[in-house]
Image (cartoon, rainbow, N blue to C red):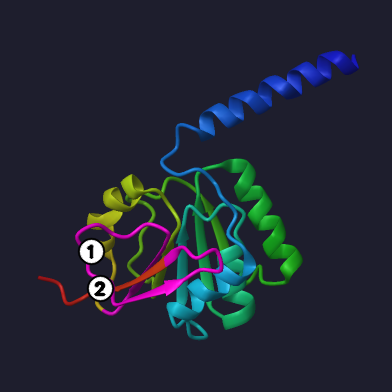
Amino acid sequence: MIIALAICLGVVTALWVGWNLTLDALWQPTDRVTVRRILFLADVKPGEHVVDLGCGDGRIVIAAARVFQARATGIEIDPCRVLWARGWALIAGVRKLVRIVWGDMYQSRVTLSDADVVVLFLSPDANFKLRDKLQQELLPGARIVSYYHPMWGWEPEEIGVARTGHPIFLYRISEKR
């Protein structure tokens, strides 16, 4: 019985890891210092809406709510991480400010029209795929913070540095053309 359970758990884990490898960005937890640097670079204010695309375990949206009293939404495709993030938001006492959505960040049902700040820690390909969505849905003045990878073809307003030494790029949506 224990051997069968171990084999079953192993198969489920292998399938989950294999599926994760097909996604546009692998999950890499961001350290606490870098999370704060990302949010400080974005100049998050109380009551603003912070959206983290591919939020993983929710640490950025939870920090936005706890430290800055911002409303925060995380979009995550992995149902296991969605449950994890929701649990951490509950434990952190910010469940009323944090919403974790199980979904695909590219789908049109996930709108960014009321976001003041969008956080990205994705792959270069994912950033490239999101360019049109960000430009079309975000209002002028909205900030985009991309950790590690730039938005190719965009000029950053500012470049910060993470605790790891990697860049944090700040962009601002200009007037629509």
Residue 49 visible? The answer is yes
Regarding mark 1 in the picture, which secondary structure is present there?
helix
Residue 127 % position (x, y):
33, 53
Q: Residue at x 22, y 65 (%)?
A: 154
Quick check: 117 above or below 54? below
Residue at 45% across, 65% down:
51
Question: Where's residue 97, x and y in %?
Answer: 59, 72
Whether residues under marks 2 and 1 lie with C-beta atoms below 8 angstroms apart, the answer is yes
Q: Which three-letter amino acid code belongs to the residue tagged 1?
A: Gln
Question: Is 117 on the left or on the right of 142, as rendered?
Answer: right
Q: Residue at x 32, y 45 (%)?
A: 125
Kind of residue at disc 2: Ile
Query: Majority secondary structure of the magenta segment?
Result: loop
If you read the primary sequence from the N terminus, does the residue marked by circle 2 or circle 1 appear first? 1
Name the residue tied to disc 2: 173
The image quadrant where one finds the N terminus is top right
On the image, which quarter does residue 22 sit in? top left
Q: Is residue 80 above or below residue 13?
A: below
Magenta region includes residue 146: yes
> Which residue matches tag 1?
135
Number of marks: 2
Q: Residue furthest right?
A: 1
Q: Which residues are magenta?
A: 141-167
Q: Residue furthest left?
A: 177
Q: Residues within 10 Å of mark 1 (few under 14, many from 20)?
A: some
* Residue 78 place in picture, x, y as percent: 55, 42
Residue at 24% of width from left, 57% of height from top? Answer: 152
The disc at residue 70 is none
